[in-house]
Structures are given as structure tokens and as C-alpha cells.
Amino acid sequence: MEAALTLVRAVHFAAVIVLFGQFAYAYAVAPDGRMPPRFRAVAAASLGIAIVSSIAWLFLEASHMSGLAMGAAWQAGAVGTVLTQTHFGNVCVVRLVVALVAAGAVFAMDSGRSPVARALGALAALFILASLAACGHAAAGSGAQGAIRLTADAFHLAAAGAWLGALVPFAALLARSTNAAGDLARAHGAARRFSTLGAASVVAIVFTGIINARYTVQTLAALTGSRYGIELLVKIAIFVAILAIAALNRWRLTPRVATTLAGPAALRALRLNTMLEIALGFAIVAIVGNLGITMPPAHH
Amino acid sequence: MKAIANGAAFAAGLVLAVLALPAGAHAFLHHADPRVGSTVAHSPAQVTLQFTEKLEPAFSTLKVLDAAGKEVDAHDLKVEGVSMRVTIPSPLDPGKYRVQWRALSVDTHVTDGEFTFEVGR
């Protein structure tokens, strides 16, 4: 049950991040300001996976909440009860509806030439991602405290999703780039813009992450003394590793990509580092899949 | 250099502001009436449990059982915010009673537990 929930959540988070990343890339990184190539295929696949995993998540929660096995929970009408009578279920319905709006917008978009459909798609994708805050521990607070936690978690998700999600089409751009001067210049420009997006994301991730941890972990002792705390420490360690790679990319590799002599070697290194960052980023997403269902030490 | 110092001061301020926020809490039993393990002089008219987090009425339960395991509450569970309660329709005889609860919090965690109280002679 726990393994299934972790897997379904991780897959869902990853799909939603990939979807949002396509838009973040177009607005903040792409050399021509357009959606990445094969955007429609990527968007359709990620939306499809997001919707299917969301439904699987709902069924698993119905079983978990009712305390019944999956089949019995379905027969007892627990899925309907979750949808109509619980906060999680209500959020799930709204997110599914917005996912359909996103699907409509993607369908209406014509390789970036319809700015309204694109903006609608971007907003819908952002909503599907940020509203995951309402499916986790941040939903538990009430009053001003609840609003702070929800807002912080929503920004955390949006910032992390923009960065990790945009990394995927950015890596594809680097993979397409040849050693021709024009390609190197384009890769250089995109790498610079990506660094700006990354820097803004890091500030938001760290700040909102501290707010979240303040509520879920509370004490330093709890950080090392609980499973939740240890998973969080591993997550932070991976994040620091990504930061180190990003700093190397920003200050060493990116300036060299534009040069004729060192350009090709720098481009190769940048390609490799970007793939590594993607792998580490999705490792964090896998941990997040489990963190959301692990009892934070603040609960004890 | 000055920009870095300003940035660091700003970041430190933010961290301090965050650390000063009130701490969060979650759906564990905060207190009960009658109190956990207590002996009350008279039969209570209702049993009320307060939790540390908002509850989902849909899958939360609360039962009061007598020593023989028979449910003595009115099956009228009311869940409101962080509290749940059932009424006791007819006065309880002196003796031990067991309160069993299952709480589903809005962040989807399930917790459960039980405790006893005693109605004195």
C-alpha cells in the first residue's frame, strides 16, 4: 500500500513537472521564445500519465482512508465518498477538471502562435502543479498558519517544477546543438537564461522549503531522529549536489560555450551535467512521493 | 561585497522570521471529556474528543463501549473542525467504559486509539 502510494505520487509529480516545464522553458529559456519541439507529444503523454496516476492515487486513498481493501473500498462506495466529502477528493476533482482545460489549451495551441491558448495552458499546468500543495501536509493547517503553509508549499512546487521541468527541454536543446558557431551561440544564450531561471528558483525553493520544514520537522533533533527527517536530509543533500553542478555550469561551462576554441568541449560537459541534474532532480521527486505519506515528526 | 552582505542580512532576516512562526500540529488526541483514564462522579451526557488537526467527517469514527463491549453511545457522531463527539442517550451505570476512535485528518493521515474512563458509584 505504502509502496504503491509512493510510486503513484512520484509518477504523478514527475508528469506534472514535465508538463509545466515545457511552458517554463518556452517563456524563460527557449532561444526563439517558442514551445519546445514535439511539445504536443510531450504534453499529451505527461497529461495522460498525470490523469491516470491521479485516478490511481484516488483509489489508493479511498482504500487507505476507509481502512478497506481496494475492492471492498470500491464496493462500499468509498471512492465516491472521498471525491465528494473529503478535502483531498475535492481538490482531486478540481485538479482533474483543470487538467482537462490544459488538454484543451494544448490542443488549441499551434506551435506557439496562439498566445492566449499558450497562456491558458501555462496557467492550467501551473495550477495542476502548485495545487499539489493542497494534497499534502500543508493542507492540515488552519487560519493564517494554514494559508502560510499552503502558499509556501505551492511556491515550492512551482519553483522546483519550473527548474526541473525546464531542464528536460533544455537538455534536448543541448543534445540537438552541433559545434557550429550558430548552435553554440544559441546554446550559450539558452544556458544563460536557464541559469537565471535556476537562480530565481533556488531562492524560492530554499525559502519556502525552510517554511515547510519549520512546520513538519520543528526541531533539529527530529531531523536526524525520524524517518521523515532522514528522508528530508537525503533530499536536501541531493539538492545541494544539484546546486554544485548548476554553479559549475553557470560560472565555468556556460561562458566557455560561446568561445570557438573551448566551445565544443564545454557543450559536451554541459550536456552531461544537465542529464545528471535531471536524474538527481527526479530522484528528489521519488523521495517526495514517499515524504507526503510519511508521518512528519511534528505529528508525534 | 556590500551587495553580498546586504543579501546575507536579508536572508538571515527571512530565516529568523520563518523560525518565529507558530509550529504546526496534527490529528492526535489533544484532550477528551471525560478525560483519558479519569473517574467521573456522574454519567456524562456526551463524550467529546479534541484533536490537534482538522478532521474529515467522512471516515472518522468514535464509539463508547461498556465492559461487555456493547456500544452505549447514540451512534450520532458529530465531527466539527478539530473535535468529534457522540451523545450518551441513557445514563451509564457505574463501571469502566472504553472509547475507541479513528481520526482521518485533512492531510489524509489516519490515526486511531482508545482509552477508558470510569463512572464512579
Image: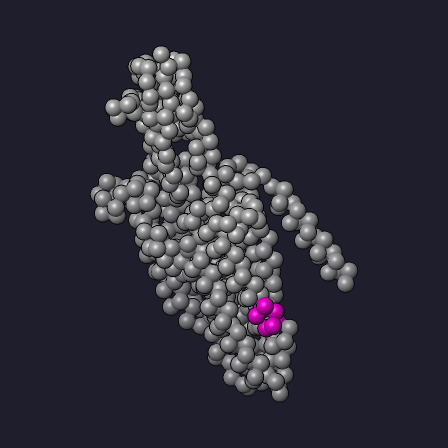
Reply yes or no: does residue A136 show up in magenta.
no
Which residue is at the front of the view, A300 or B57? A300
Side of A276 relative to B10 (left or right): left
Query: Looking at the image, which residue is at 53% across and 40% down?
Result: B24
**Residue B43 located left or right of residue A122:** left
Q: Position of residue A252 (x, y in %)?
A: 63, 76
Q: How is the image coloured?
A: one colour
Q: Quadrant of residue B117?
A: top left
Q: Is residue A250 visible?
A: yes
- Residue A193 placed where, x, y %? 59, 69
Q: Which residues are magenta?
A: A244-250
In this view, the residue in front, B71 or B11, is: B71
The dominant secondary structure in magenta is: helix
Please identify the quarter of the rendering in which residue B19 is found: top right
Residue A49 versus residue A286: which sits nearer the camera? A286
Q: Residue at x 69, y 49 (%)?
A: B13
In reply to whether residue A246 is colored magenta, the answer given is: yes
- Locate residue A285, reporting x and y percent: 45, 59
The residue lying at 30 percent from left, 45 percent from top is A63
Asked if residue A184 shows in the view, the reply is no
Is residue B33 positioned above or below A136 on the image? above
Q: Residue at x 62, y 87 (%)?
A: A261
* Residue at the bottom extreme, as displayed: A261
Give x and y (percent) for residue A64.
Answer: 32, 45
Q: Is residue A60 above or below residue A141?
A: below
Residue most extreme to the right: B2
Between B1 and A150, the one nearer to me in the picture: B1
